[in-house]
Amino acid sequence: MYAIETGLFPFAALVVGGVLYAVCRWVLRLRCNSRWVQAYIAVAVVLTTLTSFLTPVKVIEQAAETATAAEADMPLPAHTPPAYAEVHGSAPVTQADRAAAAQAIPFSPTVVPTAADATPTPPRWHSLMADAWPVAGRLYLIGLIGVLLWLMAQLLWLASLRRRYRCTDCTDGMRIYHTDRPAPFSFFRSIFISDALTGNMRRFVLLHEQSHISHRHTLKLCLMQLFTALNWWNPFVWLLAAEMRLQQELEVDDDVLRQGIDREQYQLSLLQVCTQEGKWIVMRTAYNIKPLKQRLIFMNKQLTPQGIRHQKWLALSCLALTVAAAVTVACQTHQKPADADDAAADVRHHPMAGCWTMDWISNTGSGIENHPPAMHYGFYNDSTFLCFSYWAKRGVNIAFSMSGEGYTWQGDTLVDAEGHPTSYTFSNDGRTVVSRWLKDSLQNAYVSGPDISEQWSRIEPDRDIVSVFTAMHSLGQQQASKGINGAWREEDNDNSYLLISDTLLMVVNWYPSKIARGFRYGAGGFCGSIKQQTDGSYLLFGRDTAHISQPDADHLSIDGDINGGGLPSPLIRTQLPSFLQRAFSPVVSVAAAEGQKQATE
């Protein structure tokens, strides 16, 4: 699936513009009807402009947390989960008991694990890149304003000529002004001609400029110059604009000769009027536009009906091929982040796809089963696992921690983020499964020993958890958010995010693994309801009041807390990070599968 990403993409625009101009210059010029070439140039300039600011981007899940060499030694933050009960034999606490215990605990997000003991935040690479773009944006705006001022000066100069010289004739809405300048030209419906031109020379000039006016060439040049201003840094757009001026002259020369004018006399008049005057003015149609050599060659060509048909098909074929090539280049020149493991993975179904709850975790072979005191949900889709646990819950008001990683296939073996194989032993009815993995592949394991076993039981997904994660995941699908809705990041903490939908709020403290080769993370946070009150304040989680101010569309400040727990502030707007989208995706996949199941039943 592709999406449109906005920004400034100079490399893609240079490649597209260069290819389109090369085709125009070396394939179409002097070989095709000038009208068809003008249509090609117009499409080429528009396509290059779109490539400069918009690019198709393939939407893929990425492993942005893959460690760099400098980050490989950074340990994960020390999470302190609730103590596990060490029991020999069957579990003494049922899942219903755990859920009831969570309901009985006073809801307090202040117990959520934090990164206080973590090593310093890694370099803000994405922030450094983001800081560079405003500089490029300012340079672009300076260039754009400079070119627009230059074009405005031309328009004002040309408009002033109407006041400086007298109009001697007005025919069919066209005004003829006599000037003391030797080079004749036209500007919209005004023709400026020298008093020194008489006889056939004057007649040729008037026919020439009247043809420019009938084709609205000045208007087309103005539009072309606006596109040139938008692409002022792209030399190929300037070359295409110059090519448009030449093709307009070729079109007009052909019109004049079709009226029975002697070709040699007309060509001689072009040579006589040739001058260097007024080269800086580009927003006018001039009788002496160069290069004259190409104009003379084109006028002397003799085309048969078959040659005209060949011209037409050549122009149409070049236009179709270059548009297709340009779109391909635009798609490929925008570098797409990818996980090397995921890119090579086969498309297969994970054997544990669905929703599970943990029964126990153990050092394989020890006979000691450690039973979690809180609810542990495991959500699997075909490539990603999310372990979600909570110790306090009131509907959608949940204090939680979560962790997860990506899985890939290597042959017939499913491997984790470190490339270690995992195994799954299912019960006869498929309702329970024992999974095994190596401890050194997960640094915050709860039990000792190198070989870990876990038993999970299939369970219906909790509707509150599903509704929260589905709402948060949908933020990544939105092109633009309004008001306070959207994804926010704490200004001084790259790992702290605040997500707000219409009725829900989630705070996530995100800790990507600096050891795993693939996608792996740990996180803690809390989520709950948010509702705006009549006085403008917001009621959070049904009981706490907070004042949210938004100085502009991209900044947010929160004055308030939840049961004594502070909220991240100040914040800046961001896109929902791809790693959060991927972390939430298993819950969304499970919800979608449950929806399809209910629909069929």
Image (cartoon, rainbow, N blue to C red):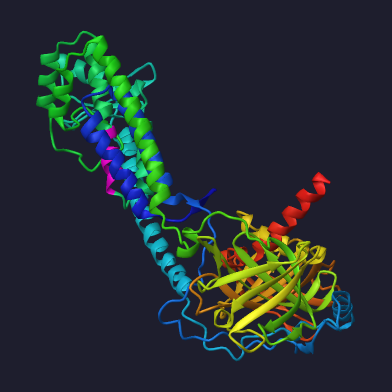
Residue 465's spot in the image, x, y percent?
77, 67
Instruction: Locate residue 482 relative to residue 279 in the image: left or right.
Output: right
Residue at the spot 56% in from the left edge and 64% down from the top edge: 578
Residue 572's spot in the image, x, y percent?
59, 71
Please determine whether, in this image, residue 415 is positioned above or below residue 30.
Answer: below
Instruction: Spot the residue most to the top.
Output: 260
Q: Is residue 338 visible to the viewer in this orientation of the structure?
A: yes
Please determine whether, in this image, residue 363 is positioned above or below residue 487.
Answer: below
Residue at the spot 62% in from the left edge and 74% down from the top edge: 571
Instruction: Locate residue 378 relative to residue 162 in the image: left or right.
Output: right
Instruction: Locate residue 442 relative to residue 252 in the image: left or right.
Output: right
In this view, the residue in front, 280 or 135, is: 135
Instruction: Locate residue 583 relative to residue 466 in the image: left or right.
Output: left
Residue 395's spot in the image, x, y percent?
85, 70
Q: Quadrant of residue 20?
A: top left
Residue stretch in magenta: 235-244
Residue 580's spot in the image, x, y percent?
61, 67
Instruction: Spot the residue most to the bottom.
Output: 117
Q: Is residue 553 visible to the viewer in this orientation of the structure?
A: no
Residue at the spot 26% in from the left edge and 28% down from the top edge: 247
Residue 157 is a magenta residue? no
Q: How many marks?
A: 0
- Prevailing SS of the magenta stretch: helix
